[in-house]
Image: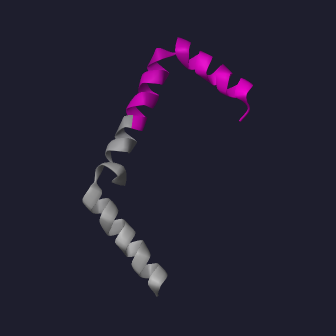
């Protein structure tokens, strides 16, 4: 994606508030369900990856 394409999308979203809000909601939901906000889950996932690398 070029800088001009990115700018065009950003300007379109500026005038399309329902789509912008939907995107914000989607990003928020993805973040809340990610391992970044679950330190125990993140540690378990990393341990699992490290164990598979050790084999």
Q: Where in the figure is residue 12, as x and y percent of width and height?
A: 60, 17
Q: Which residue occupies 38% across, 31% down?
A: 25
Residue 50 appears in which quarter of the rendering?
A: bottom left
In the displayed structure, would residue 42 be above or below residue 6?
below
Q: Nearer the viewer, residue 35 or 8?
A: 35
Q: Which residue occupies 37% across, 36% down?
A: 28
Q: Is residue 6 left or right of residue 25?
A: right
Q: What secondary structure do most residues of the magenta stretch adopt? A: helix
Tell me how the rendering is colored: one colour
Q: Which residue occupies 71% across, 35% down?
A: 1
Q: Where in the figure is residue 2, as x and y percent of width and height?
A: 74, 32
Q: Where in the figure is residue 55, as x and y percent of width and height?
A: 46, 87
Q: Is residue 23 left or right of residue 11?
A: left
Outermost residue, left direction? 40
Could one spot residue 22 in this view of the protein?
yes
Residue 42 appears in which quarter of the rendering?
A: bottom left
In the displayed structure, would residue 5 be above or below residue 42?
above
Residue 14 forms part of the magenta stretch: yes
Residue stretch rendered in magenta on the structure: 1-27
Q: Nearer the viewer, residue 33 or 44?
A: 44
Q: Which residue occupies 61% across, 16% down?
A: 11
In the displayed structure, would residue 31 be above or below residue 10?
below
Q: Where in the figure is residue 24, as x and y percent of width and height?
A: 42, 29
Could one spot residue 34 in this view of the protein?
no
């Amino acid at each position: 994606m070029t800088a001009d394409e990115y700018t065009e999308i950003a300007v379109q979203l500026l005038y399309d508030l329902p789509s912008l809000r939907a995107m914000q909601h989607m990003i928020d939901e993805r973040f809340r369900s990610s391992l970044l906000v679950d330190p125990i889950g993140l540690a378990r996932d990393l341990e699992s990856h490290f164990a598979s690398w050790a084999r």
